[in-house]
Image (spheres, rainbow, N blue to C red):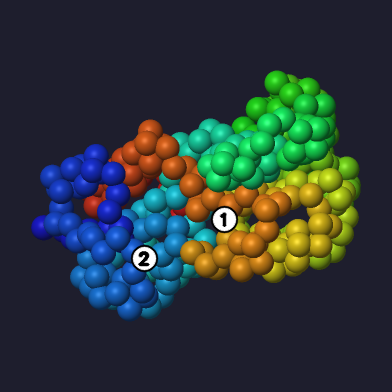
């Protein structure tokens, strides 16, 4: 019977799909495994169902000569050594499309929460410090009629942009290719990153992590932003120089940030934790019941397909 290693407990619907066909090894520790632990569990398996924070590299692949497929429970796959997997003829799959709308929802939730200081308001109420309406209490920033800058106009970036229709916003975007849908429906304008950063009130990042996008937003880029700008990141933490961003927020070089991803997850820059002009969420972009179940089903089906000699629908390599 072929063996599957699942690096973390996932929705039961996928477990049921797989246990009908294969022998399962599941990490039940409730935490991320160390590389040494992953290697030990990967010994002699035919498939790995990994999470985005599991580093699947040459050493892990060396643990099993039987390894045929790595199904990543995520859209991104920068945690997997794709070159090494290709060399070994190991299929790598991901879960695109399914989490697009859910992640776009969260980007807007962060935008609203940061612009209108929702966490600060919640703290005041829970601590019973609300003394009545005041003219200057928790002043934030309007969203309607402002300029939204989309950095990376792929599926999620486009979904975020389209949600701006109800707020009569001007939309700028920075992308390798022209986005016809955004231009047609929003009259969005493709611009340089420099122009986008300088003219946007709200900047939302939607880029994969590559050598080119690593620390794409650093000191130079933050200096271009307006003092009233708010930046949202639901892509990958390392797209932003986290330490530089934290210092900029502390000095109020920009008005605020809403972050769902971090450079060294689960660790977060200590300065960010001390600031009230940043809203922090624990990487929950796809965290809805419906989406996480669909992701699990897609990952499980990819494994079933490969091990039954079929071509999976969502193949990276």
Q: Position of residue 271 (x, y in %)?
A: 66, 67
Image quadrant where residue 201 sits: top right
**Location of mark 1 (residue):** 261
Q: Residues within 10 Å of mark 1 (few under 14, many from 20)?
A: many
Whether residue 19 sits left or right of residue 110 in the image: it is left
Q: Which residue is at a point 45% across and 58% down the rendered structure image?
A: 52
Q: Nearer the viewer, residue 133 or 302?
A: 133
Q: Position of residue 311 (x, y in %)?
A: 34, 45
> Does residue 151 appear in the picture of this structure?
no
Q: Which residue is at a point 21% across and 70% down the rendered structure image?
A: 44
Whether residue 53 sits left or right of residue 300 in the image: it is right
CA–CA distance between discs 1 and 2? 16 Å
**Location of mark 2 (residue):** 32
Q: Nearer the viewer, residue 40 or 257?
A: 257
Q: Position of residue 244 (x, y in %)?
A: 74, 67
Q: Which residue is at a point 70% across and 37% down the rendered structure image?
A: 116
Q: Is residue 291 above or below residue 264?
A: above
Marks 1,2: beta carbons within 8 A? no
Label of residue 8 in the image: none
Q: Position of residue 233 (x, y in %)?
A: 64, 50
Residue at the left extreme? 1
- Quarter of the figure with the N terminus: bottom left
Q: Residues within 10 Å of mark 2 (few under 14, many from 20)?
A: some
Q: Secondary structure at mark 2?
A: loop
> Does residue 199 appear in the picture of this structure?
yes
């Amino acid at each position: 019977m072929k063996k599957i290693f699942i690096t973390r407990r996932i929705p039961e619907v996928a477990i049921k799909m797989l246990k009908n066909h294969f022998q399962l090894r599941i990490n039940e520790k409730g935490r991320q495994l160390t590389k040494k632990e992953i290697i030990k569990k990967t010994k002699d398996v035919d498939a790995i169902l990994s999470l985005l924070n599991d580093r699947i590299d040459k050493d892990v692949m060396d643990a099993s000569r039987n390894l045929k497929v790595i199904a990543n429970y995520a859209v991104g796959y920068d945690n997997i050594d794709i070159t090494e997997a290709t060399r070994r003829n190991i299929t790598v799959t991901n879960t695109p499309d399914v989490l697009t709308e859910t992640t776009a929802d969260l980007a807007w939730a962060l935008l609203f929460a940061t612009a209108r200081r929702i966490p600060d308001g919640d703290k005041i109420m829970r601590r019973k410090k609300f003394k009545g309406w005041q003219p200057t209490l928790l002043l934030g920033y309007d969203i309607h009629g402002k300029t939204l800058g989309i950095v990376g106009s792929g599926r999620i970036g486009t979904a975020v942009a389209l949600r701006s229709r109800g707020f009569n916003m001007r939309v700028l975007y920075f992308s390798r290719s022209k986005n016809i849908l955004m231009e047609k429906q929003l009259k969005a304008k493709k611009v340089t990153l420099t122009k986008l950063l300088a003219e946007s009130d709200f900047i939302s990042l939607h880029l994969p992590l590559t050598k080119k996008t690593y620390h794409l937003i650093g000191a130079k880029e933050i200096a271009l932003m307006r003092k009233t700008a708010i930046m949202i990141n639901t892509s990958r933490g390392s797209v932003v120089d986290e330490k530089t961003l934290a210092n900029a927020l502390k000095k109020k070089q920009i008005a605020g940030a809403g972050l769902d991803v971090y450079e060294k997850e689960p660790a977060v820059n200590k300065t960010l934790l001390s600031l009230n002009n940043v809203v922090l969420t624990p990487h929950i972009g796809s965290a809805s019941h419906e989406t996480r179940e669909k992701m699990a089903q897609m990952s499980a089906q990819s494994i079933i397909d490969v091990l039954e000699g079929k071509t999976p629908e969502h193949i990276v390599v």
